[in-house]
Image (cartoon, helix red, strand yellow):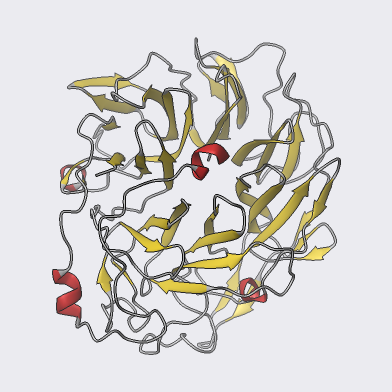
Amino acid sequence: MDALTRRIHLALLVGLAAASALTAPSGHTPAEAVAAAGPGVVAAPNTPSLHWTGRTEQINELARCGPTIYAVGSFTKIDQGGVTYDRRHAFSFSATTGAMTSWNPAPNGVVNAIALNATCSRAYLGGSFFAVGAATAHNFAAVDTARGILIGQFRHEAGNVVEAIVLGAGRIIVGGSFRHINGGTHPYLASLRTSDGADDGYVHVAISGTYTYTDDNGAQARSGPPRIAQLVLGPYGGRLILLGTFTSVGTQSRRQIAVLRLGSYVSVDRWFSPEFAANCAVGAPFYVRDAAWSPDGHYIFVADTGYKPATGAGFRTWQPRAGLCDAVAKFPAGSDSNTRHVWVNYTGCDSLYAVAADATTVYVAGHERWLNNRAGCDTAGAGALARPGVGAVSAATGLATAWNPTRSRGLGAHDLLLTTRPTGLWIASDNLDNLAVTCAHSRHPGLCFLPAG
């Protein structure tokens, strides 16, 4: 996501923070929690949406550049204003009116990530594809935003899937499952020149390690090979969060998450918490799915899947929740190798996949049914508040706010983007169940915008 966009204040809060504490039941019954659901914010009516083609499709990531929003994912057709447009895996539209643009690069496979240069003239795409339009491009591409064609004299070759792209330190920084990209030999994480896409060697940090562990029932987990799944640039551009499967970054022991310093050279920041070394359910060895910086760069918010801890407290579903699994948590961002969370808010064993933050509020989305649900697992425990598909918590206290537009859970929301002019929250998701897909009580398959009240 665009670091500048993440810094913009979003005035979407429509009530006071919920009264229940996160570390103890509030006294609300599950019935009262469900009754608290309300219409909340009205979604903008003219946003594009995923056309139903007979199979579930999804939008993976959003990026804004100037007056235009770009969307990438796994889809073939987009509906907007009563018209269906052929758009394979990438499209763009007006941020203010929702009107589709003519941009149609048509990668022939899934696009996971997009980033744009400062002039909005180039879009960098990463995913799992081997062509853009009629031109060859393997898993990475630089595309003209005016004509939708590949940039000439630019390399477009990654040896495996690209999952994340940011522009930082005057370079294109790319993460994924690849072992080589554009002629370079830096696996999983590399930096590319903006002139021709060649690996410039700036990010020369070894990524290694996989997870193997056994849960309290004796089931064994084995993660896949190392990969970088997400990159999140800090608000001032000097620090970069890495999320992925690894046990070592550079020479430092790290799991799930690490922070790099981007200066005259790249170094591994001391920031880390031992809490990320704890394991979640055997089906989710990698569980930290998204992160966001506070606008001042003083805190890091993480959104997690994972279901429940693999061992110890919280492993049994009848126990109170523990650890970081299926939760959103706040950590100080100072360079401390033994930092601890400030607060954790549990969904109660439902996944969170996306997080965004402004100065006062942290927005989360995924496949969740509740927030403030420390006492439940797949049920609304005492104190839980119904927040299906999207919710918000106070950045200061971690308590769920009264903001509750609701969203069809589907497979889960995959990205959140805060913008101004219009001020609001964009939610990228899927069209599972087609006609039943709603956001703020109106039909919005795959994409919805919740404006300020």
Of 192 and 405, which appears nearest the observer? Answer: 405
Of 368 and 185, which appears nearest the observer? Answer: 368
Q: In percent of the image, x 53 and y 88: which residue is there?
A: 216
Of 10 and 164, which appears nearest the observer? Answer: 10
Residue 194 against residue 324 in the figure, above or below: above
Q: Position of residue 121 (x, y in %)?
A: 57, 16
Q: In percent of the image, x 86 and y 40: which residue is there?
A: 264
The quadrant in which the C terminus is found is: top left
Q: Quadrant of residue 237?
A: top right
Q: In percent of the image, x 36 and y 75: which residue is there?
A: 348
Q: In percent of the image, x 37 and y 16: which residue is there?
A: 101
Residue 371 against residue 126 in the figure, above or below: below
Q: Is residue 126 left or right of residue 80?
A: right
Q: Quadrant of residue 273?
A: bottom right
Q: Position of residue 274 (x, y in %)?
A: 67, 75
Residue 252 against residue 154 in the figure, above or below: below
Residue 9 against residue 130 in the figure, above or below: below
Q: Is residue 277 left or right of residue 436?
A: right
Q: Position of residue 440 (x, y in %)?
A: 20, 48
Q: Is residue 446 left or right of residue 357?
A: left
